[in-house]
Image (spheres, rainbow, N blue to C red):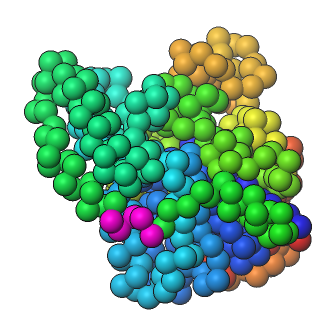
């Protein structure tokens, strides 16, 4: 028996959706444990491109149970639209294959308005938020003034809490942010309609998981974003509002750490990030533009162009350490096939001194200088490779060098967007 956590090992957008989709074959339950619809997984199934924002990518496999855990913040409108689209394409034939934690928190209209208004007032210190209300919803969760799914399903409780919370939210919107207030009746009516649809999916998902684990079922925990966006361990304040690292799988699902056996970090063969914040290996030249073009580096959720740079082993070593990674799934190796030479960042210096790990202080991180090692490119199409040995020798050398610098075994190599364009070196479920 093995239970596996999949996390992003960089700044998000590493290709977790594809890896989760592949590992789903070996799991019984697939659990999304944090974040909201500020994340997006893009999957290519045959010739079809599918983008999911909330629902675990395991939903594309029949006979699997997908769970959205208590650590997620849910926008009911987005969830229902996603469900509807999947059903229209014949993807969901049985509602019992999808469960929502009764304890997850609900994104409200005022969360989105506050999110957008704050970002607009931030000037040149913008965080790069998606404006989907994720941060303000998590603020209310921690401040003990949030609305949980169980509250939404009880109309009396929902009405009482909404009236109480709107006093503060409308004051903030009108007096501090200069925005129109929110109307109680409009929100109450809209969200009661959502409650009627959501009710069929609600469960005590922590109890469901406990029973399944006790029965020896295999569980795959699916994170969103990346380790460097973790609210505690990321490049604060340029982070998301949840625990993206492996520990979040436990708090965000109600499962004990004793049940976690493997932790796989997903990493591109280069690196990207969306939004503001430090990025030492960022390429602000034609090479960066070429990486973006070849890799199709535009956000699955927002469509924003991603910032692109060379692979950063300082970032990957940090992710290995804080997550306790047991393996790395390397994605988008094929994107590098057109380059004559490829650089790898092996360390940072600051004011002439070598740094041991990522600096905690933003001011230092923003002014780090990357130290590069240059490796030869392979200049060959690798998208048809079915085994590691079929890769060009120089591509093999590149992968093994990344593995050596990371101090963690590479267990999977992706050579294209499709499911079948994947080389498995070790199955964490085996």
Say which residue appears at 40% left-offset and 86% top-offset: 89
Magenta segment boundaries in residue numbering: 196-200
Q: Is residue 198 magenta?
A: yes
Image position of 420 (left or right of 167) = right
Quarter of the image for residue 107 reads top left
Q: Looking at the image, which residue sits at the far top?
A: 351
In the picture, residue 420 is in which quadrant?
bottom right
Mark yes or no: residue 384 visible.
Answer: yes
The quarter in which the C terminus is drawn is bottom right
Res. 417 in view: no
What predominant SS class does the magenta segment belong to? helix
Quarter placement of the N terminus: bottom right
- Expressed as whole percent of the image width and height from the top left, the position of residue 22 reads 68, 74
**Above or below 194: residue 242:** above
118 on left or right of 413: left
Nearest the eye: 93 or 338: 93
* Picture residue at 45% right of the left edge, 74% below the top: 50
**Residue 7: horizontal and vertical position, in percent?**
67, 51
- Give the image location of residue 153, x and y in percent: 38, 55
Q: In the depicted view, which residue is nearer to us: 358 or 94?
A: 94
Left or right position of 249 against 113: right
Q: Is residue 368 magenta?
A: no
Picture coordinates of residue 223, whole percent (x, y): 61, 52
Which quadrant of the view contains residue 309?
top right
In-front residue for pair 13/191: 191
Q: Please say if 273 is above or below 276.
A: below
Name the side, left or right, on which 218 lies relative to 183: right
419 over 253 or under it: above or below = below
Of 203 and 313, the residue lying toward us: 203
């Amino acid at each position: 028996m093995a239970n596996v956590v999949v996390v992003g090992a960089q700044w998000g957008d590493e290709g977790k959706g594809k890896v989760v989709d592949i590992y789903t074959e070996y799991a019984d339950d697939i659990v999304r444990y944090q974040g909201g619809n500020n994340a997006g997984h893009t999957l290519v199934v045959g010739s079809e491109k599918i983008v999911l924002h909330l629902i675990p990518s395991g939903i594309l496999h029949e006979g699997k149970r997908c769970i959205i855990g208590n650590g997620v913040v849910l926008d009911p409108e987005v969830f229902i639209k996603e469900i509807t689209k999947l059903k229209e394409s014949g993807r969901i034939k049985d509602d019992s294959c999808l469960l929502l934690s009764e304890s997850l928190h609900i994104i409200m209209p005022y969360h989105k308005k506050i999110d957008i208004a704050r970002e607009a007032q931030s000037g040149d210190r913008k965080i790069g938020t998606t404006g989907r209300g994720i941060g303000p919803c998590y603020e209310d969760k921690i401040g003990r003034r949030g609305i949980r799914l169980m509250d939404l399903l009880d109309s009396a409780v929902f009405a009482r809490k909404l009236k109480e919370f709107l006093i503060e939210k409308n004051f903030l919107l009108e007096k501090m942010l200069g925005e129109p207030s929110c109307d109680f009746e409009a929100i109450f009516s809209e969200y009661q309609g959502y409650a009627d649809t959501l009710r069929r999916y609600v469960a005590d998902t922590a109890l469901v998981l406990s029973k399944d684990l006790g029965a020896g079922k295999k569980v795959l925990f699916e994170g969103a974003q990346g380790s460097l966006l973790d609210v505690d361990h990321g490049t604060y304040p340029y982070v998301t509002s949840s625990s993206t690292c492996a520990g979040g799988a436990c708090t965000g699902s109600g499962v004990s750490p004793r049940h976690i056996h493997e932790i796989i970090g997903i990493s591109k063969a280069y690196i990207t990030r969306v939004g503001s914040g430090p990025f030492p290996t960022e390429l602000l030249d034609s090479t960066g533009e070429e990486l973006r073009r070849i890799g199709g580096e535009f956000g699955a959720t927002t469509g924003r162009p991603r910032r692109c740079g060379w692979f950063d082993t300082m970032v990957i070593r940090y992710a290995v350490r804080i997550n306790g990674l047991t393996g790395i799934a390397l994605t988008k190796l094929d994107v590098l096939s057109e380059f004559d030479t490829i650089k790898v960042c092996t360390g940072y210096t600051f004011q002439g001194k070598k740094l041991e790990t990522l600096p905690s202080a933003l001011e230092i991180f923003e002014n780090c200088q990357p130290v590069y090692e240059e490796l030869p490119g392979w200049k060959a199409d690798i998208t048809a490779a079915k085994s590691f040995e079929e890769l060009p020798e120089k591509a093999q050398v590149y992968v093994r060098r990344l593995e050596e610098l990371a101090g963690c075994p590479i267990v999977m190599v992706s050579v294209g967007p499709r499911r079948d364009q994947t080389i498995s070196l070790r199955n964490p479920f085996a």
